Every structure is written in C-alpha cells, then in structure tokens.
Image: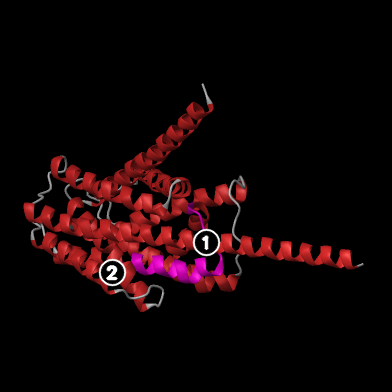
C-alpha cells in the first residue's frame, strides 16, 4: 500500500480511537449517574445516605490513587508545599465535597432526566462566577446566551411532572459549588503552573474531601446508621459503584488528554440526551413536551457557547502561530544583518 494509503489508515485509526474514548466516557458517566440513583432512591435500593456514599467513593479513590502514586509509582506526584496545599487544594476540596454531597442528595428527590436538564446551567454558573472573580471578561452577547440557557431550564422546570423544590435547591447548589471549584482551579492552580491529572487530583483532593464530609456525616447520617440494625454493608454494590466512579476519573483523563475538553463537552450533551431517554423509557420517569422544549432551548444555548469557545480557542492558537512566525522572521533578519556586517568588516580589512 502506498504512502497515501498508510496515512489514511493512521487518520482512520485516530478517529476510531477518539470515538472509543468518547464511548467509554459516556458509558462510565452514564453508569455512575444511574448507579447512584439506584442506590439513593427510596423506590429502588433505598439507601438514602448521600454523604456516606460520597465518603465511600472518596475513600476508595484516595486509596487507589495513593497506591498508584506512592507504591507502584506509576504517576509522578506534583511538587507542592504545605502552604500551597492549604491555600489552594483545601478550598477546592471543600467545594468539591459540597458539590458531590448536594448533587448526590438531589437524586433522592428528582428524576435523572430533570437533573440533567438542571445541569445545563453549568456554563451560566461558570461564566457568571468567572466574571465576578475577574477571570472572564463581560460580553453582552455571551450574557444574552446565558440568559437564553436559563430561560430554557426555567421552562423545563415549569414542565417537570415531579417538581420538588428542595431537590431543585440541592441541585442548583451543587452546580454553584462545582462552577466555583472549576473557576478556582484556574485561579489557584493553573495560574501557578500546577496541572493535576485525575490521579494526582484524587491523590491530593480526595483525602481533603473526606475530611470535610466527615463533619456533617457525624451529625446528619451517622446517628441514623448507628441506630439502624437492618443495614449490612454490601461490598458488591458499593465496591462496583466506587470502581465505576474511579474508572470515570480515568476516562476523563483519557478523553481530555487524547482529544480535548471541548470534545468532552460535546460528548456530555450526547450523554445527557441518552440519560433523558433512559430515564423515560427504563426508569419510567415522566418527561413532558414542555420539559423537552425547555431543555432543547437550553441545549441550543450550550451548543452555541461551546462553538464560541472553540472559535476563541482557534483565534488564540492562530495568534500564537503568527507571533512565533514573526519572532522567527525577526531572528532570521537579525542573523542576516549580522552576517552582512561581518562580511563588510572582512572586506575592509
């Protein structure tokens, strides 16, 4: 086969690998969400202890991360001082623990489909918090798009058959804490040149989350679990659930590392529609036409936001290439001028 044929094979292989990473991430993300819903929902497994479930996840992930980093040394730890850990990782860990606690709690009160619709507000929260913390610049067209997403989610909420105010408050709180965490990662870590992959992130953040979750767990869930004689820890259920949560972190690393963060955003939209379809067809949650119309409107806003981000990223890369080309041209010009001066000096001598 000629050179062109081998190139085509390489391109096809790369495309297939990208789709494989996307499929693995969608499958694991889908599985973790449905599995958490199954465990927490009172009509299913009936174990409504979201703090305990989150602590089990964090304990499992922290243990595996420690083994990979310290025992097998498969992943290099990040050089981090105690002051940097306290000032940067601890606030991120606190926000992450609150986000996980509230988002898992929402599964007790809301359907899977409606939760995915509410999660469409994430770009709105990230942009708004980014503007308030001077990380994003205010743009009228972007804010108009954020308003359109919010209106779409409001319409979806209006059409929700199983609307629960407390559940909505929990999910909106989870979105707010997660958005703040994402912005603070940029401010506290990325701006200092510190990049954490999912393994090192769990290695540093998971123990911190565990410590923060322990405080409310002692007062909210531990007394109930202590007095409950019917509960027996199911290692198969909680073990496989924790394994799926850890595998999801690895899938995020693969997807973003081998493709891009934007690919994950697009894959996330596909996953949300699949979850809505699954929630309606298998779990038998009610999905109304108003739900779909509202989420469709929000979906268009999110798609436009991702498109704008992609265009901005392309423009930034083009500017970098232009700057590098100009720098190289100036360097060559200086070299030639230096050679010319050297030759003139030689001829004069």
Q: Is residue 286 left or right of residue 309?
A: left
Is the magenta region chiefly helix, strand or loop?
helix
Q: CA distance from mark 1 to mark 2?
A: 27 Å
Which percent across, then down, holds residue 304? 27, 59
Which percent across, then down, holds residue 285? 12, 48
Bin the neighbour count of mark 2 within 10 Å (Cα to Cα): few under 14, some 14-19, many 20 and up: some
Determine the residue located farthest toward the right in the rendered image. Answer: 349
The magenta stretch spans which residues? 176-198
Which percent across, then down, holds residue 307? 31, 57
At x 52%, y 24%, the residue is 2
Query: Foreground mark, 1 or 2?
Result: 1
Queried whether the magenta region covers residue 188, the answer comes back as yes
Q: Quadrant of residue 145?
A: bottom left
Q: Nearer the viewer, residue 108 or 292?
A: 292
Determine the residue located farthest toward the front in the rendered image. Answer: 348
User: Which part of the image, by quadrant, shows the C terminus?
Assistant: bottom right
How many dots with numbers? 2
Q: Is residue 193 above or below residue 276?
A: below
Q: Which mark is residue 240?
A: none
Queried whether the magenta region covers residue 315, the answer comes back as no
- Residue 45 in view: no
Secondary structure of the residue carrying numbered label 1? helix
Q: Nearer the viewer, residue 190 or 262?
A: 262
According to the picture, the residue beneath numbered tag 2 turns out to be 142
Colour mode of the rendering = secondary structure
At x 48%, y 56%, the residue is 202
According to the picture, the residue beneath numbered tag 1 turns out to be 322
Bin the neighbour count of mark 1 within 10 Å (Cα to Cα): few under 14, some 14-19, many 20 and up: few
Secondary structure of the residue carrying numbered label 2? helix
Q: Is residue 328 above or below residue 74?
A: below
């Amino acid at each position: 086969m000629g050179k062109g044929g081998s190139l085509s094979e390489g391109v096809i292989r790369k495309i297939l690998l990208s789709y494989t990473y996307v499929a693995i991430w969608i499958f694991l993300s889908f599985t973790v969400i449905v599995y958490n819903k199954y465990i927490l929902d009172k009509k299913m497994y009936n174990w409504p202890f979201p703090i305990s479930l989150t602590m089990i996840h964090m304990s499992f992930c922290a243990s595996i991360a420690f083994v990979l980093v310290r025992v097998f040394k498969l992943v290099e730890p990040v050089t981090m001082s105690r002051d940097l850990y306290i000032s940067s990782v601890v606030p991120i860990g606190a926000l992450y623990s609150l986000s996980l606690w509230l988002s898992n709690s929402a599964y007790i009160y809301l359907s899977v489909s409606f939760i995915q619709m509410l999660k469409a507000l994430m770009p709105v929260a990230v942009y708004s918090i980014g503007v308030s913390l001077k990380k994003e610049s205010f743009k009228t067209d972007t804010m108009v798009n954020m308003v359109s997403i919010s209106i779409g989610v409001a319409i979806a909420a209006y059409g929700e058959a199983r609307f629960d105010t407390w559940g909505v408050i929990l999910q909106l709180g989870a979105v707010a804490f997660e958005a703040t965490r994402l912005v603070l990662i940029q401010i506290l870590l990325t701006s200092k040149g510190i990049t954490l992959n999912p393994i090192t992130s769990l290695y540093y953040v998971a123990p911190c989350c565990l410590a923060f979750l322990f405080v409310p767990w002692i007062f909210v869930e531990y007394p109930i679990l202590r007095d409950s004689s019917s509960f027996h820890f199911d290692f198969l259920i909680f073990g496989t659930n924790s394994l799926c949560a850890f595998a999801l972190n690895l899938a995020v690393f693969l997807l973003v590392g081998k493709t891009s963060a934007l690919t994950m955003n697009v894959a996330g939209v596909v996953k949300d529609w699949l979850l809505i379809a699954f929630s309606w067809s298998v779990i038998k949650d009610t999905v109304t036409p108003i739900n779909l119309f509202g989420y469709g409107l929000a979906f268009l806003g999110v798609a436009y936001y991702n498109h704008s981000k992609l265009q901005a990223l392309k423009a930034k890369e083009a500017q970098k290439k232009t700057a590098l080309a100009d720098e190289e041209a100036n360097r060559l010009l200086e070299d030639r001028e230096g050679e010319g001066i050297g030759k003139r000096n030689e001829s004069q001598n």
